[in-house]
Amino acid sequence: MKLLERTLFSHATAHDDDDNSSQLMGSAITLLTFVFLVVSMRVYCRAYLLRNMGADDWTMIAAAVSMSGLSWCSGEILRRRRKLWGRERELADLIIGDLVGCS
């Protein structure tokens, strides 16, 4: 069986089973949940129990916030790409239907 190699500018047809965005978003949401759980537990321990927040704690908070922004942007890209792939398939079906109808 020949492997289908896809690049950014390839014109290979997209199939429904080629889309792995749901698995990617599921793992991103799981990891973000874990990150915010760990960061919130650390902030609770350092700020309320020890009363000593250091630069490393603030860096972890900034990293968690920026990671959530990056994940949100990635999700938007995947959502828009999924819409684009759907439109390309619909357009290809219309063009092929017109060509078949004309002949």
Image: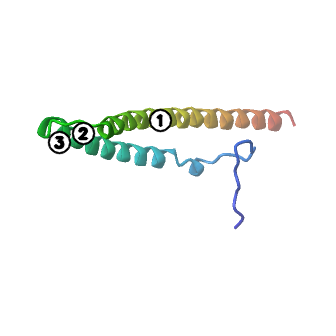
Q: Residue at x 32, y 34 (%)?
A: 58
User: Disc 1 or 3, which lies upstream in sequence?
Assistant: 3
Tell me the quadrant of the picture where the C terminus can be found: top right
The residue at the far left in this view is 49
* Label 2: few (<14), some (14–19) or many (≥20) C-alpha neighbours in 10 Å: some
Mark whose residue sits in front, 1 or 3: 3
* Label 3: few (<14), some (14–19) or many (≥20) C-alpha neighbours in 10 Å: some
Q: Residue at x 59, y 36 (%)?
A: 81
Measured in 3D between alpha carbons, the distance from the residue under mark 3 to the one under mark 2, in whole angstroms, is 9 Å
Q: Secondary structure at mark 3?
A: helix
Q: Which mark is residue 40?
A: 2
Question: Which residue is the site of mark 3?
Answer: 45
| Relative horizontal placement of residue 23, taking residue 7 as reference (left or right) | left
Measured in 3D between alpha carbons, the distance from the residue under mark 1 to the one under mark 3, in whole angstroms, is 27 Å
| Relative horizontal placement of residue 5, taking residue 64 as reference (left or right) | right
Q: Nearer the viewer, residue 97 or 33?
A: 33
